[in-house]
Image: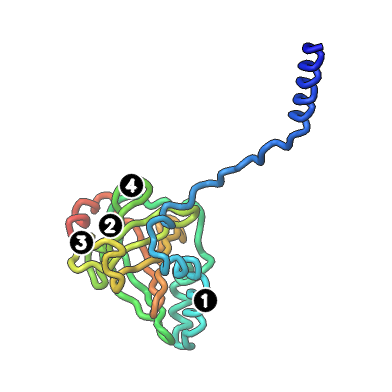
Amino acid sequence: MTRTIIAGLMLTLAGCATGRTPPPTVTMGPPPPAWRTAIVADDVDRIEQLPGAWATARQRLGRRATTTIRTEGDLLRADAALPHPALPPGSYKCRLVTMARVAVRKTGSFFCYIGDEVGDRISFTKQTGPTLLGGWLYPDGDRYVFMGTRQRRPGNAALGYGADRARDQVGVVERIGPFRWRLAMPGEAFEVYELTPVPVEQQGATSKS
């Protein structure tokens, strides 16, 4: 009799087990891009709303800027970004084009430097000319996200992003042609830097500038 009761209980428990709903499967998504864990919250909106800021800057330009816009071509065309944005380390010739309300301002050439990869980012330093930028470029799909600061001394990147909010700058780097990139930064005036690598035989001299 005892064996019969035990067997019945085992069958009952087995039936309950087969009818039990299995626990839900938790699927972990991919981790967020590294720049999202390092950026100041207010600057996330500036990155995500960059296309709108670009369109607004273009719309504000007066007719006098039409020729300049046409001449600059892909540099100032928001949808000109290409895949495979990898930036080789070394010296670059840079120039700045600013869309400031109804006018476009341009500077002459100066030098910038792209450093080797450090973990999940690469360094960017503007070595000469006005507006001494320095900071980091974080890969993000077909672009890099720039997080940096207007430095106090040429060729220096000692002042880190987030240390002085009045100096912080954010933007996006995209490839727009063979050996040609741009860094677009929204703000009161929309700034676009053109970056083209310095020839290999000149790299040593320009990196010391």
What whole-number distance in Å separates the C-alpha atoms at marks 2 and 3? 9 Å
Q: Residues within 10 Å of mark 2 (few under 14, many from 20)?
A: many
Q: Nearer the viewer, residue 71 or 43?
A: 43
What whole-number distance in Å separates the C-alpha atoms at marks 4 and 3? 18 Å
Q: Which mark is residue 117?
A: 4
Q: Amino acid at mark 3?
A: Gly
Q: Which mark is residue 155?
A: 3
Q: Residues within 10 Å of mark 1 (few under 14, many from 20)?
A: few
Q: Give the residue at x 76% y 20%.
A: 10
What whole-number distance in Å separates the C-alpha atoms at marks 1 and 3? 32 Å
Q: Which mark is residue 55?
A: 1
State the image coordinates of residue 26 (x, y, percent, origin top left): 61, 42
On the question of residue 112 being in view, the answer is: no
Q: Which mark is residue 113?
A: 2
Q: Amino acid at mark 2?
A: Tyr
Q: Nearer the viewer, mark 1 or mark 2?
A: 1
Which picture quadrant has residue 15? top right
Q: Is residue 91 left or right of residue 143?
A: left
Say what secondary structure mark 2 lies in.
Answer: strand
